[in-house]
Amino acid sequence: MTRVSIRRADFMMVLAYASDLATGHSRDFALKSCVLAMRIAELAGLSEQVRRNAYHQSMLRYVGCNADTDLLSATFGDEIALRQDLVGLDMGDRAELGRVFVQSFKRLYYDLDPDAQAKAIEAAMSQALAVARPVLTAHCEVAQRIGERLGLSDQIRRNLGQIYERWDGKGLPRGSSGEDVLPAVRLITLAQDAIALSEAAGIDRMAETIASRADGPYEAGLARLVSANSAVLMEGIGTTVDRETILALEPNPPVMLDEAACDEAFLAIADMIDMRMPFTLGHSRMVAELAEGGGARAGLPATDVQALRWAGCIHDIGELVVPVATWMRNGPLSVRERDAAQLHAYYGERALASFGRDGDAMAGLVLRHHERLDGSGYHRKVGGSDLSPAARILAAAEAFQTSREERPHRKAMSSEAAAAQLRTAVREGCICPDAAEAVLSFAGQPSRRAPPRPLAGMTSREIEVLRLIAAGLTAKEAARKLDISPKTADHHIQSVYSKIGVTTRAAAVLYAVEHSLIRPGETQV
Ligand SMILES: [Fe+2]
Ligand SMILES: [Fe+2]
């Protein structure tokens, strides 16, 4: 097995992207706040420790935002629109907060006649704060738990427990004030509002508003510093932020995660995605388990099996862009809602950009997890030739697991009924028969046929070597990648050539392409 070593900051960028989707923030909002906060820290001469905490706080502040989302949605309607309205708002200003709540209730009760709407809004207003308070407290606790699973320090976790606290004591959950609000919390609250305000009204208006709120939500000295230096601080902060910028800002030394820590981080992301709705709890980790098990049963190379495990964890991360009410609807979606829902695979692929080349295999799987062999899936409607064996396994695992879970419009199926449904999809040409049988066999469902024979009798390791060689790596490079000696790699290559009946690399490449081990044009794996 190749040794795994991934920057923890890459995971934090994925989580930042996910929280930006779920909260209706602008693209790369959290990353922009990270850049700005580090500049403010530099200008204010803040300590290394505060910078370290702020670096993490900027990206993870809203990572607990999926807690109790169904409750928030039931009370306020479209929770993403509500959160969008709250961006940059001084939430200590009860009149402003009330105005945003009323706006939200008007959206929710749009179809009532004026009298009934007024009554419904009045009733909802009397409940609003009582609902919001525990939800916001849950955001802190969940953020802390996710931080723990990423292996963050106690200090950073303490900061995540204060995400809604303010300098003037009007925040939540404890109403801490002044110096009791941790320095990195003060810094990130200010930096994120500065980004939101400058995006909404421009840098000059942002500077005025920040100055006017000194000693309110923000510590006065810091607010004045930002206001007086707004142009310099905001210089070059565009609409997006690239990965390298964020990696370069990480306080030294950069934190690397080994395979076990990566597994835990992916599971933390899976749970973060699934906790948004009661009926999806545990969905992603089960898909990951089935996809990994199915991949192994099908004899896929170890790198594919690992990509399946991690892609399974993260496959529905793009769902966060769609309000919970849409997923919870017990009835047909509008065309626009359906389009938005189907794009979740695309947003999922985008989320994995933080991993750079390390995320390519996973991103390809996430992008295709609802595609079908006959082109009847979504969102790109590609068919068999664009679906690798691993992509077919993930699609089968996802479909099987989803059938076993309850949805608002139907009850959960038994494993037997879900297996029968998957086999029907195979007969209809939607799901790959080998993929379905591999997943079902792993899930303990009686097989309808003999398990698929490994390709040309090759071992998993040999298939892995073939993929690397076909992708253009030399024997030495393949050996390094797989953490084996060049001599062993050479031995595998000779064995592969003999089993597939070729003597040249070109013929081996062709074989790999024909058997979907590598796609045309792919030059690295
Ligand atoms: Fe899913
Ligand atoms: Fe999905």
Image (cartoon, rainbow, N blue to C red):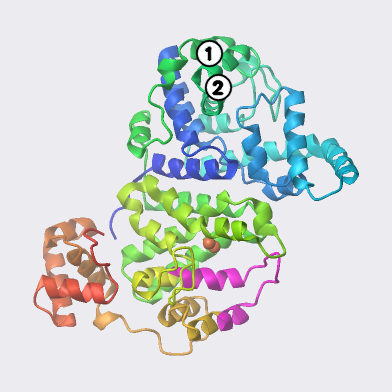
* Residue 47 seen from this side: no
Tags 1 and 2 in contact by the CB under 8 Å rule?
Answer: yes
Does the magenta segment cover residue 65?
no
- The residue lying toward the viewer, choosing from 190 and 110, is 110
Residue at the front extreme of this rendering: 114
Q: Residue furthest left?
A: 503
**Vertical placement of residue 507 versus 6, above or below:** below
Report whether 89 appears left or right of 447. right
Residue 2 percent coordinates (x, y): 28, 57
Residue at left 44%, top 41%?
13
Quarter of the figure with residue 507 = bottom left
For mark 2, does the 10 Å Cα neighbourhood hold few (<14), some (14 to 19), or many (20 or more) residues?
many
Quadrant in which the C terminus appears:
bottom left
Tag shown at residue 190:
2
Split into quadrants, the picture shows ligand 1 in the one at bottom right
Q: Earlier in the sequence, mark 1 or mark 2?
A: 2
At a point 66% along the width and 15% down the height, the residue shown is 216
Quarter of the rendering containing residue 293: bottom left
Q: Amino acid at mark 1?
A: Leu
Residue 242 is labelled as none
Q: On the image, numbered disc 1 is attached to which residue?
A: 222
Q: Which of these two is toward me, 40 or 492?
A: 40
Is 404 on the left or on the right of 381, as rendered? right
Asked where in the image residue 45 lies, by quadrant, the reply is: top left
Q: Amino acid at mark 2?
A: Leu
Q: Does 505 appear above or below 61?
A: below
> Does 37 sit above or below residue 524?
above
